[in-house]
């Protein structure tokens, strides 16, 4: 089994790509919806929650873990790799490199949570990959939280998208990086707000391909369990209703959905 986690439902965009890249491999996805979104949580809390979820996935027998959350990757992935040095852990980061390759006017926008954009790993990434292009960083506070409700066509959500996309239109960017795994779930609204001429960059497929290569022989040991014969299990630390609703609309395969309690004290999870 390969473990996948995000602060909420957003990582389903990565899960779908991962299932396509390694078909037949059991996947266990944890949505930490009780604490979503990570992009508006303190750094220490994201570290604790990420370690707690990773520990749960390891206890279930995960042969590898995909951190399907930009904020958790930026804040916690080094900690997870240090704690489980023999376990392959793959993260996700905003797709600046493919954006540089795609842009025609060298004007790029990055939509992400405030925590991702403020993180040291993102600053390092931008310095290494911007290649002199104009890059407008657009924090989107509250957007992931609205997506978590499961109503992806709510007027309030669409209004928020339009507000965050206005500076991107004003800056005349021709490429926009979706720097949060929640955002591909509402890509059609973002596309409508920025215009049809703007290219949206989603790194889910690239992350899934990298994970398939990184896990390699670990996948040979993966197989459906008696408890999860379908092979795909979705767990939520909050109300699983939104996870169930979005999974039904977004995933082209069957999956079980259940609630999971992960309330281990921070001192034991760190």
Image (tube, grey):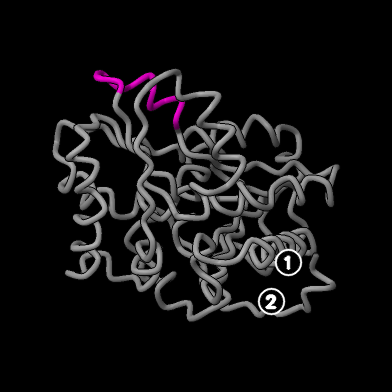
Residue occupying image coordinates x 66% and y 80%: 261
Magenta-highlighted residues: 96-106
Secondary structure mostly taken by the magenta-highlighted segment of the chain: helix
User: Label 1, label 2: how many angstroms apart (C-alpha)?
Assistant: 7 Å
Secondary structure found at label 2: loop
Position of residue 50 measured from the top left corner of the image (x, y, whole percent): 68, 61
**Which label belongs to residue 146?**
none
Mark 2 highlights which residue?
Answer: 262
Q: Is residue 159 magenta?
A: no
- Look at the picture and state if 145 lies above or below 17: below
Residue 265's spot in the image, x, y percent? Answer: 78, 79
Q: Are the residues flagged by discs 1 and 2 in contact, CB closer than 8 Å?
A: yes
Residue 194 percent across, percent down from the top left: 18, 42
Quick check: 265 above or below 182?
A: below
Q: Earlier in the sequence, mark 1 or mark 2?
A: 1
Which of the two residues, 41 or 147, is positioned nearer the viewer here?
Answer: 41
In the picture of the structure, the residue carrying the numbered disc 1 is: 52
Q: Nearer the viewer, residue 207 or 61?
A: 207
């Amino acid at each position: 089994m390969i473990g996948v986690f995000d602060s909420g439902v957003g990582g389903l965009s990565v899960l779908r790509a991962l299932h396509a890249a390694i078909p037949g491999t059991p996947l266990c996805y944890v949505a930490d919806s009780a604490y979503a979104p990570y992009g508006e949580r303190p750094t220490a809390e994201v570290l604790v929650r990420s370690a707690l979820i990773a520990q749960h996935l390891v206890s279930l027998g995960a042969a590898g873990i995909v951190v399907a959350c930009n904020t958790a990757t930026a804040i916690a992935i080094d900690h997870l790799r240090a704690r489980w040095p023999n376990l392959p852990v793959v993260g996700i980061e905003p797709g600046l490199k493919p954006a540089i390759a795609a842009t025609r006017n060298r004007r790029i926008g990055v939509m992400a949570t405030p925590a991702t954009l403020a993180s040291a790993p993102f600053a390092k990434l931008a310095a290494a990959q911007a290649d002199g292009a104009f890059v407008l960083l657009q924090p989107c506070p509250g957007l992931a939280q609205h997506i978590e409700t499961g109503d992806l066509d709510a007027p309030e959500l669409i209004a928020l998208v339009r507000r965050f996309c206005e500076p991107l239109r004003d800056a005349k960017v021709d490429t926009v990086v979706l720097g949060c795994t929640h955002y591909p779930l509402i890509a059609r609204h973002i596309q409508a707000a920025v215009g049809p001429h703007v290219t949206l960059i989603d790194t889910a497929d690239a992350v899934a391909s990298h994970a398939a290569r990184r896990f390699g022989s670990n996948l040979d040991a993966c197989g459906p369990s008696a408890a999860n014969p379908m092979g795909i299990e979705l767990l939520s630390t909050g109300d699983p209703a939104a996870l169930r609703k979005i999974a039904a609309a977004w995933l082209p395969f069957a999956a079980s959905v259940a609630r999971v309690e992960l309330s281990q004290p921070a001192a034991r999870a760190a």
